[in-house]
């Protein structure tokens, strides 16, 4: 169409999609151009037909279940988002508090306990959050430490012994956690170090088995346990006992000193492996993976598509697998940090050699060996004779021819 | 649906009103893309669930375009996953009209219009449906389809010309011009 306004403009005009100025210009053009007028008329008629056709097509709609779900969701989002925000903020604050307190409270308690009682420093394991309850586990005289917290003004409530935790735990009600953290922070500027301590000691003693048994009893009394035991007796009846025990890390020095009493220390070696970085990294990865898991669970609860559900569940499994791996490694690390290993080798002093050799002379044994040798010789001899007899057809003619030839030359 | 009137509604009432207004056209629109009624319903359900989570103040002024855009994106994602059709932008393959729809057609002209529409390239079909089925203007269509205004204008002109060629005998432009 050869005109100032092309068909696109005329279509837009017919469908009333032009702004006022464009509309006026096209309108003027259409008024003056019969072909354009006809095109616009056709477009308008087609538009009307199209609308009618669209309306006459069967209408698809949502089913009642989906409609209800949408309306149900419409009731919730505002409240839900608010709740999620609140829960997120509270959870983040709780995590910060727990982590901070887990690092600082034990240090402060150790510091106070050590300074006031002169006992070796003790680690406290914190559990159960800090909403008024402080838990001390795996610690000797934990109730006393709890009462110290109370006396320092960090706990306002009662102190209860917890024999169900091996007789060494305590719960302290009404702990002022923030106060404890502030007070403790000023007294423990050094960050925690996570060390895996391993000791090897060789001891010469009169009675290795008794020494090993006594050492074992001492380790158990210190809250430790035996993880490996190996006993050897040599030809002279000397005993050698290897025993590996795990004792609480803070009891390592005491246990090593106790070993001096068992005899002459031939060798002593103490190693410390610093795993602080790995420990902290694992903590961080556990936190991140836990958050990822929460987010995936959140998505899972919202999605309705089976495909999405399957994908989220696959990802969720992967995250949980990683989380469990790291948590497992973290538990191992924690245990190895909490319990130091001592490998003690108890040997007995060398004794005078016996006059009689270890393997003594025996007539019966010699006779038996001689008879066995004779029987063996007889077997070999008979075997050879059988072979010679069977091969007669081969060697006898050769021998005969050889003898005849020799006899003729001998005559000559 | 004017913002002034709906501003006083609670979120639930507002969503219910939007649902009543846009449910059918959106399912129809999603169906044209995914070609499966249940998938189309899923798509529209997701669209409305997203509406429930959306900031009402931000989208209310352009609600129609927003809904169609979300619905289209979701439908295209679903369609890609389902691999039921080729890429919309590249495809020029005619789509066979739905048998049940055709059977339900009472008006012969309407049936022919839909038959012609079904033979159009998919982009033209989509623009055409958004205009005549869902009453969106060119600007809204360009936003929903993520194309320029000029492209929408071209698509619409081409679709109308294709219809004009097929329905030549039934058209009476003179009467329309006078009216």
Image: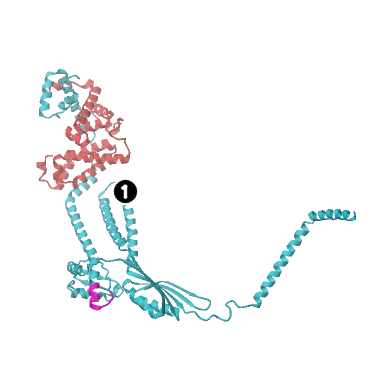
Chain colours: A cyan, B red
The spot of residue A53 in percent (x, y) is: 22, 30
* Crowding near the residue tagged with mark 1, few <14, some 14–19, many ≥20 C-alpha atoms within 10 Å: few
Q: Is residue A296 above or below residue B61?
A: below
Q: As rendered, which of A320 and B27 lies closer to the eye?
A: A320
The spot of residue A314 in percent (x, y) is: 33, 51
Locate residue B167: give its quadrant: top left
On the picture, is B86 further left or further right than A132? right
Q: Quadrant of the C terminus of chain B?
A: top left
Locate residue A210: give its quadrant: bottom left
Q: Is residue A9 above or below residue A178?
A: above
Locate residue A203: give its quadrant: bottom left
Question: Range of the magenta residues?
Answer: A110-120
* Dominant SS type (magenta): helix
Q: Secondary structure at mark 1?
A: helix
The answer to if A179 sits in the magenta stretch is: no
Is any atom of residue A4 visible in this view?
Answer: yes
Q: As rendered, which of B20 and A140 lies closer to the eye?
A: A140
Q: Is residue B132 above or below residue A31?
A: below
On the picture, is A13 further left or further right than A198? left
The spot of residue A262 in percent (x, y) is: 40, 80
Identify the residue under disc 1. Answer: A311
Which residue is at 90% across, 55% downward? A411
Q: As rendered, which of A313 and B104 lies closer to the eye?
A: A313
Which chain does the numbered disc 1 sit on? Answer: A
The answer to if A116 sits in the magenta stretch is: yes
Which residue is at 24% across, 78% downward? A117
């Amino acid at each position: 169409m050869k005109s100032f306004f092309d068909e696109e403009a005329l279509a837009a005009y017919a469908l009333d999609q032009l702004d006022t100025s464009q509309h006026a210009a096209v309108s003027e053009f259409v008024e003056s151009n019969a072909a354009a007028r006809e095109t616009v008329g056709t477009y308008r008629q087609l538009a009307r037909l199209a609308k009618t056709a669209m309306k006459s097509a069967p209408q698809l709609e949502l089913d009642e279940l989906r409609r209800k779900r949408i309306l149900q969701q419409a009731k919730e989002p505002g409240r839900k988002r608010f709740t999620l925000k609140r829960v997120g903020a509270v959870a983040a604050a709780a995590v910060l508090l727990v982590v901070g307190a887990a690092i600082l409270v034990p240090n402060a308690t150790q510091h106070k306990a050590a300074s006031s009682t002169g006992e070796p420093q003790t680690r406290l394991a914190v559990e159960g959050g800090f909403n008024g309850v402080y838990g001390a586990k795996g610690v000797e005289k934990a109730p006393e430490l709890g009462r110290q917290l109370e006396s320092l003004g960090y706990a306002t409530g009662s102190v209860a012994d917890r024999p169900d935790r091996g007789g060494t735990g305590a719960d302290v009600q009404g702990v002022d956690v923030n106060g404890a953290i502030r007070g403790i922070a000023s007294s423990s500027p050094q960050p925690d170090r996570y060390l895996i301590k391993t000791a090897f000691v060789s001891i010469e003693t009169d009675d290795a088995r008794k020494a090993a048994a006594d050492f074992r009893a001492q380790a158990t009394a210190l809250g430790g346990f035996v993880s490996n035991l190996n006993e050897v007796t040599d030809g002279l009846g000397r005993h050698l006992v290897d025993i590996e025990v795990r004792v609480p890390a803070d009891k390592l020095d005491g246990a090593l000193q106790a070993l001096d009493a068992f005899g002459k220390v031939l060798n002593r070696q103490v190693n410390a492996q610093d795993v602080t970085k790995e420990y902290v990294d694992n903590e961080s990865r556990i936190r991140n993976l836990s958050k990822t898991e929460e987010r995936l669970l959140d998505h899972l609860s919202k999605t309705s598509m089976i495909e999405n559900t399957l994908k989220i569940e696959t990802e969720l499994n992967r995250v949980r697998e990683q989380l469990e791996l790291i948590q497992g490694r973290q538990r191992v690390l924690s245990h190895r940090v909490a319990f130091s290993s001592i490998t003690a080798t108890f040997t007995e002093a060398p004794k005078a050699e016996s006059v009689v050799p270890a393997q003594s002379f025996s007539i019966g044994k010699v006779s038996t060996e001689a008879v066995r040798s004779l029987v063996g010789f007889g077997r070999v001899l008979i075997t050879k004779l059988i072979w010679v007899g069977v091969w007669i057809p081969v060697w006898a003619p050769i021998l005969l021819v050889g003898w005849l030839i020799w006899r003729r030359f001998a005559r000559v | 649906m004017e913002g002034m009137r709906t501003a006083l509604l609670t979120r639930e009432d507002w969503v219910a009103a939007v649902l009543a207004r846009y449910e059918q056209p959106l399912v129809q629109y999603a169906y044209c893309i995914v070609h499966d009624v249940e998938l189309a319903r899923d798509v529209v359900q997701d669209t409305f669930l997203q509406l429930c989570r959306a900031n009402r103040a931000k989208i209310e002024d352009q609600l129609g375009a927003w809904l169609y855009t979300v619905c289209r994106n979701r439908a295209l994602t679903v369609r890609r996953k389902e691999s039921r059709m080729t890429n919309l932008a590249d495809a020029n393959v005619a789509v066979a009209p739905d048998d049940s729809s055709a059977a339900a057609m009472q008006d012969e002209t309407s049936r022919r219009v839909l038959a012609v529409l079904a033979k159009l390239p998919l982009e033209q079909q989509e623009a055409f449906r958004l205009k005549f089925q869902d009453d969106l203007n060119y600007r809204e269509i360009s936003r929903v389809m993520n194309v320029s205004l000029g492209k929408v204008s071209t698509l619409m002109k081409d679709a109308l010309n294709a219809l004009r060629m097929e329905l030549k005998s039934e058209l009476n432009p003179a009467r329309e011009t006078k009216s």
